[in-house]
Every structure is written in structure tokens, then in C-alpha cells.
Amino acid sequence: MIEKNGPADSVSGEFPEWDAQPEAPMDAAGATVDLEEEEELFEHFRFTAESGQRPLRVDKFLFNFLNGISRNKIQQAAEAGAIRVDGKPVKSNHRVLPGQIVAVVLTRPPREIELLPEDLNLEVVYHDADFVVVNKAAGMVVHPAYGHYSGTLVNGLMYLFQELPHASDRERPGLVHRIDKNTSGLLVVAVNDYAMTHLAKQFFDRSTDRRYTAIVWGDLAQDEGTITAHIDRSLRDRKIRQVVQDGSRGKHAVTHYKVLERFGFATVVECKLETGRTHQIRVHFQSIGHPLFNDTEYGGAEQRAVPYSPPNFKAFVQNAFGVCPRHALHARTLALDHPKTGERLQFSSPLPEDMQALLEKFRKTQAYSPS
């Protein structure tokens, strides 16, 4: 395995390895049903061959059902292992028999929107003929959407890499996942159609490994733990999510965490997602009374009652909000299989300056006592 690492930062050195965790639930086709921010980027289709159907190549079978999808794109999906018959991956020349279930995962074609290249001084961590890894700055929207038609990561990528798949008529060229506007850190972007299909399948199967560093309010009771709770859209505000404690609605979600550093009034944690839901880390930590520091949408942007706090705590907190003027969450590591070679690659990004400055401020307080 090749590791691609950025410079070290001061939270810790090497993080301990996680124990293997069970994969997220899979459907009959062997593909996971949902993702985090990328849950809207892919479409999952299932078809059952009729009893009277003659044996037919799977690419022709799917071409008959999928309107607006080229046979070439279907064949690329097969090459990437994204087409399954009765749960097993097949090649494009596999013949479908009556009664068999055919499933395929395809990137979702977004709405048409004019995209213009912009020089946004993006930080490119890695680039080859198949994909790009970018270290996104906090405050940057990933792709154009309502209210954000320029200055997005996609606009910057178009300036640097004109060869992105379908960049002339898609609002999300090359994207296979995304992170929140005010979350910083690593994203992978496909450079060609084959890589896009292959990477999309990895995210659907959750064979990628993404870890985040977060600063949360309060002193967590355990050094490591797991938060399991359904997540659904808020009934009061459709832009945010909420935990559904009884599991009567929403989607199953699991977040594993390990404590990296304690301050009494705040805790630094590393998070690994077993499932992927929109805002999962932010929602889960809010649900246990430890919202992310300065998270305006989930209760972290106001002073909270904590067991230990430095003198003049109110002024201290307001000053700290100014040091890190967004929720303290960074997508720090990313591991994936190269779409062409199959080699496992790992990338890392140091904490950005605002989170580093926040930690330095915390370490200087009287409340901080290393244990």
C-alpha cells in the first residue's frame, strides 16, 4: 500500500488502527443503499428478467431499460464491477436468464447549468491520469447549486483539469462524494469516465476509508465509543438533520470515535463513519450532548455548561469562535483503491490553521491539564 501523507500536525502522530468494523447493510445486489453527502450523486437500479425472456447480454438488457444511458457507459459500469446479477458482479457479455435480478449503480446525471473555469488556487494533493485528490478549504462550496453559481470547487477544478468527465454540461463533473461547505479536508475527483464509475462503486460499497478530526464541546465520558442512531431530515428545518431515537423513521447511522486530546470544556476526537449520512458526525455528537465547537446549525455556536472551564469563560469562548469561525471538522485522511491498478492508496491532510490556532488557544488555558 502506498501512503500519500501531508506534513504532520500537533494533535498527535500516527493514529492507532481501528479494529475491523462490520460493513453497512447491503441490498440483494450487494451494493450499500445510502451514502453521506454523496447519497444524491448515484442512482441504483434493479430489474428482474421476465419468465419468457430469451438469454440476453446484460449490457443489452440494461440498455433496453435505462433511458438516456449509453451502452458504452453501461459497459464501463460492468468493467468497474458495478453491475451484478443475482448479487454477483458480471462482465458486459454475461447473458441474463429469466427470473434473474440485475442491479447496477450509475452516477446520477445532474441538472444542466453553465459552468465556468475559475482560478481559485486549489490545493491539489495528488493527481494522475485517473483521479485528483484535493484539500478543500473551509468556506468553499463543492459544486454549483442554488445561491452558489461560482467560486465552487468544481469551478476551480475546471480551471486546472479541463479533461474532467462531461465538464461542459454537468454541474458536478468528476465528483463521487462531497463534504459540507464549512468542513475542510480531502476529496477525490475522477478525471475520466472509467475512474468515475469505479470510484463511485467504492463509495457505494464503502470500501474507501475516510477519517475526520473534530473538536466537540464538553468532556466525553469514554476514550472511545460508538454512536448508533437513526438520522432523518428535521421536521422543523429541512436543511438540517436530526436523530430519531426510536428508529421509527430515517436511516440507520453508526459513528465510531476515539479521543485524541482533552481540555475539560472541549475534546478532540477522530471519527470513522461505518455508515454515511448527511451531517452524520455533527448530528450524532449533538445527540449525545457534545455538539461540534462553533457549529451554528447544531447547537455548538453558543456557550455551554461544562464541568471545567477557564476564568472569564464567556469572553474566552467568544474569542475562540473568532479564532475558528466555523464548525471544527476536518476530513483528515482518505484511503481508496486505484481504479486502474487496484493499489491501495492513502492520503492525509494536516489540520488547517484555524483549527490549529484553536487548539493552541485551548492548550494555554488553566483548565487544560494533560492526563
Image: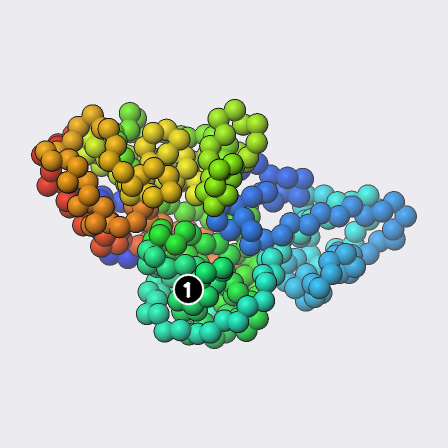
> Which residue sits furthest right?
52
Q: Residue at x 57, y 71 (%)?
A: 169
Q: Position of residue 113 (x, y in %)?
A: 55, 68
The residue lying toward the viewer, choosing from 183 and 32, is 183
> Residue at label 1?
152
- Give the vertical position of 321 relative to 127 (above or below): above
**Residue 33 visible to an observer of this rendering:** yes
Residue 335 in the figure: left or right of residue 317: right
The quadrant of the image that shows the C terminus is top left
Q: Residue at x 55, y 54 (%)?
A: 41
- Give the vertical position of 69 relative to 246 (above or below): below
Q: Residue at x 54, y 27 (%)?
A: 247
- Give the vertical position of 307 relative to 263 (above or below): above
- Give the vertical position of 299 relative to 9 (above or below): above
Q: Amino acid at mark 1?
A: Thr
Residue 293 in the figure: left or right of residue 88: left
**Location of residue 365 (image quadrant):** top left
The residue lying toward the viewer, choosing from 79 and 105, is 105
Q: Position of residue 344 (x, y in %)?
A: 44, 53
User: Number of labelled discs?
Assistant: 1
> Which residue sits furthest front?
236
Q: Position of residue 107 (x, y in %)?
A: 59, 57
Q: Residue at x 46, y 35 (%)?
A: 242
